[in-house]
Image (cartoon, rainbow, N blue to C red):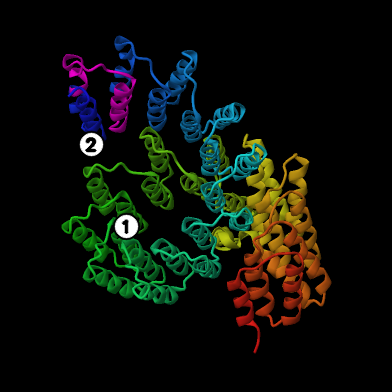
Amino acid sequence: MLRSIPISKTGYCRNKDVDNALKVFMAMPQKGCRRNEVSYTNLIHGFCEVGKIDKALEIFSNMGNDNCSPTVRTFTVLISALCALGRMSASLNLFNKMVARGCQPNAHTYTVLIDGFCKDKKFDEARGMLNEIARKRLAGSVVAYNALINGYCTGGMTDVAVEIFDMMELNNCRPSVRTYNELIRGFCRVKRIHKAMTLLDKMKEQKFSPSLITYNLLIHGQCVDGHVDNAVRLVSLVEEDNLVPDLWTYNAIIDALCKCGRIEEAHVLFDSLHVKGIKPNEVTYTTLVDGYCKVEKIDHALSLFRKMLLEGCFPNSCTYSVLIEGLCKNGKLHEAAKLLEKMVERGVKPTIITYSVLLEQLLKEYAFDDAQKTFNQMVSLGYKPDVFIYTSFLLAYVNQGKLKEAENLMTKMKKEGVHPDFKTYTVLIDGYGRLGLLHRAFGFLKDMIDAGCEPSNYTYSVMVKHLLVEKQKEKNSSQAGFDLNQNFTSTNIADIWKLIEFEIALDLLEKMVEFGCTLDVNTYKALTSGLCREGRFREALMLVDNMKKKELTPDEDMYNSLVSCCCNLRMYDDAVRLLDAMFQCGYLPHLNSCKVIVCGLCDDKSSEKAKTVFCSLLNYGYNHDELAWKLLVDGLLKMGLVDICSELVSIMEDKGCLLNPQTYLMLINNLPS
């Protein structure tokens, strides 16, 4: 009888019925059952599980009344719950109290703190906790390493995450498949898919079997980077490893095919899913519907939408939103409004994205009354306008020259706790630039930078455009009949980098300093990428020299822009020199550029130089299958350069670079018969 009471209490806790668990707990002394550390910890854990952390802390504070001392599990449960709520100060105080009482933290205690600190962006504190684990040689520390690696990757600091990964090996802590997956996820998040692919080789070298999650992350990364053919090739590797691709695998590829306009291929893959025993879900349908909308085949999108309903796959708010957007962009605003009504009738609650799409189109047409009605309807449903909605209103005001209303709306937006993004700031910068009020434009650029909002390439292009207009205005003010608006203000932003003189780029940098804006690598990166897109390589290099004088170092993206520019200009010797500089900095060039360099050198009868470049790529850790796909299959074989392709395959074999059997099959199948 005495044993049944704590057992029933534990059962209540497991079922998250903490109120009944508490009643049983309070009745234990009357039933002759002593409350101990285990019963306290179970009850505390139960309250933490249902989010009642303050009640859990109250129970914790009463443990001494029963002569109970909290165990490491008691402390860890509470620390974990506080971390999950973002109450890092309280969790650290409890940790310090734990240590002061002589209760030694275990690896799990440190791990939850590391995870909490990472989510709070306090990476130094997280790393300090990891050092404590290593110093105390606690078991299970791979989980802690994974937590810190995930934290750095989530924060976009993949280089530091790699340092932690290397530290694992130095401390004789063997990584797990999850460790690799966290790093792969991190590289894919910052669009470093080639670095993610290198980890696939390393996993196999270390005798780890990649999981389907590993491959799905890589497939998704290739798709996001626009390398859909590589994603499809990875599916072959999945099957080679006796894994079965799932819906997540195919959804990523269908989405990528749609995004690059290959909608028919996407539909063929969609139709093949039932043969593979995979049932499309609302994400699959929505992706394809969106794809048809993007290529302005709205009738196909509506037909697919109807098929979705017939198949018993119910559209969600995202499905309706993409279809409403498609209708809006195809000039069917009335049909879009009707679909919104139908959506509500079918019990699907519109989201803020749904309203954003409709409001954007209404405001583009300056239908302010209808936009206000839609806005009020949205607010009545309990939605707060987000940065996208505010920016749509701002753009409409700016396009009508109502800058005062735009500024007032910006002030209101900030009061509502909505932080402007780069688009919001750029809209106002452009508005004042159009009026020739460059001092106000630069003022907003400074506000943008001071707020920690990184200006985009488009932002800098807008600034350059208005500097160009200002310069031409000064130059031609004496010329009668000169129509500035016709000649320059209507120029497409994409063409600005063709028109500007190099001095305007320098003028922008000088004026930014004059207005108190901090120049950083991203500033120079935006300007050099604009020049590189137009083949102005020498001027881009001059900007890099200017940057180095300010003790700023070009990053990987800048080098890749320069290499790509050289490739487009067939300046392969310059490109090779840039590759060497990148390798010295530990950067990996994009494989598309490497393909162009190797193929270009071969085409120019410089096959020995091409071999040297290829060997360099082998030495710097690229995934061997990906190298073969891009440089050999997509490059040399498509150009009909079979002999040099065979030579490079031999070089790979001599260096012990093993290719997947599927890759060999691809090479054979692409050889001319």
Q: Which residue is mark 2?
A: 15
Q: Which mark is residue 250?
A: none
Q: Report the Cα–Cα distance between label 1 and label 2.
A: 34 Å
Above or below, comparing residue 202 to residue 610 in the picture: above
Quadrant holding the N terminus: top left
Task: Where is residue 469? Give x, y as percent.
Answer: 61, 54
- Left or right: 343 in relation to 434: left
Residue at disc 2, secondary structure: loop
Q: Is 33 contained in the magenta span?
A: yes
Residue at left offset 45%, top offset 15%: 97
> Residue 135: image x %, image y %?
61, 27
* Residue projecting furthest to the bottom: 673
Q: Which dot, 1 or 2, sits closer to the camera?
A: 2
Q: Looking at the image, is mark 1 or mark 2 earlier in the sequence? A: 2
Residue 285: image quadrant is bottom left
Which residue does the numbered mark 1 point to in the structure image? 318
**Magenta part of the chain:** 24-53
605 left or right of 135? right
Q: Amino acid at mark 2?
A: Asn
Residue drawn 38% across the image and 25% down it: 78
Tell me which secondary structure the magenta stretch mostly adopts: helix
SS at mark 1 in the image: helix
